[in-house]
Amino acid sequence: MEQHFKSRPTDLLLVTSPKSGTTWLKAMIFATLTRTSYPLDQHPLHTHNPHQCVTNLERVFSTGRRQIIEAIPSPRVFNSHLPYSVLPQTIIDSDCRIVYVWRDPKDVLISMWYFSGKIMGGADKIATFEEVYDSFCQGVNNYGPIWSHVLGYWEESKQRPEKILFLKYENILQEPVKHAKKLAHFIGCPYSEAEENQGVVEQIVELCSFGKLKNMDVNNNEIPSMSAHNISPSYFFRKGEAGDWKSHLTQEMAERLNTIIEEKFKGSGLKI
């Protein structure tokens, strides 16, 4: 990817650590950018999984399909799970913008546990939950320790706020309309006063809400081919809520992970 990907100034990159709201934010960004191109009741999100609407850079290059990248007209929207430290230099140096979303690591762990279990045909096919939890606490995770992933983008967002919009999953859940406006402004297509008066922001938020997406036929099925990742679309939708870790972690487990994260975040200004 470093050798072949060429970023454009108009590119938009959504970055998350896996299981941190990727599907939801793909839908939100895509719907925001295309809101004037389709009536919302005929929007492509009704017939396409969000992962079909926003291309994952790693998957494109790992499957030898990089030619499709150049064919996408500007403005292009991609997503990635790469840590900031290993992003292609062309992304770092260009004027393209990055939206980064992070989530309470405890909920990331639970979501990843269930997602991996679905892919493997059962959570018990991976390892015991206690083993997965212990590995997570030691920093064993796809794309590196989650605290390093978050901090990399956090520190850069403080230096270059015009390039990186740093958001927290739980905050978006609490105030979706506020964050939908913030997102639209950052990506260069703010809502007009007329749109706000007509309730367009609320309509976009509703279209992209977890419950709405989960219950759409295109996402509520077990057909792998209907997802750009060749994974059943329904696998990407479980609960979409904050605090589910409380049903899975003991107080001791939660405190241990919190202590680790707080120590890693110390001095950064970030809090869980």
Image (cartoon, helix red, strand yellow):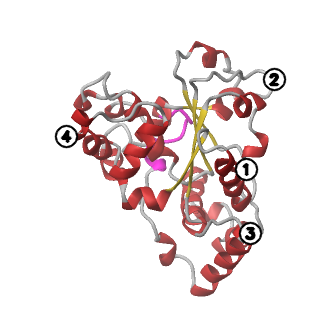
Question: If you read the primary sequence from the N terminus, does the residue marked by circle 1 or circle 4 appear first?
Answer: 1
- From the image, tell me which residue sits under label 2: 3
Quarter-of-image position of residue 65: top right
User: Which of label 1 and label 4 is nearer to you?
Assistant: 4
- Mark 1 and mark 3 lie on one chain; the one further toward the N terminus is 1
Which residue is pictured at 77% across the width and 69% down the height? Answer: 138
Quarter of the figure that contains the C terminus: bottom right
- Residue furthest to the bottom in view is 252
Vertical side of 66 occupied by 45: above or below: below
Residue 236 coordinates in the image, percent (x, y): 48, 48
Is 244 left, or right, of 91 in this rendering? left
Q: Which residue carries the number 3 mark?
A: 264
Image position of 100 with respect to 272: above or below: above
**Local crowd at mark 4 within 10 Å, few (<14), some, or many (≥20)?**
few
Tell me the tag on residue 143.
Answer: 1
Which label's residue is closer to the chain start, 1 or 2?
2
Measured as percent of width and height from the top left, residue 116 is found at 60, 55
Q: Which residue is mark 4?
A: 197
List x then y, in percent, for residue 95: 64, 28
Magenta stretch: includes residue 266:
no
Q: What residue do we see at 57% from left, 86% from top?
A: 251
Q: Would you call the spot at circle 1 few (<14 residues within 10 Å), some (14-19), or many (20 or more)?
A: some
Task: Select label 3 or label 4 by which is in front.
Answer: 4
**Crowding near the residue tagged with mark 2, few <14, some 14–19, many ≥20 C-alpha atoms within 10 Å:** few
What segment carries the magenta color?
Answer: 227-236
* C-alpha gap between disc 1 and disc 3: 17 Å
Q: Nearer the viewer, mark 1 or mark 3?
A: 3
For the image, the number of numbered tags is 4
Looking at the rendered structure, the kind of residue marked 1 is: Tyr
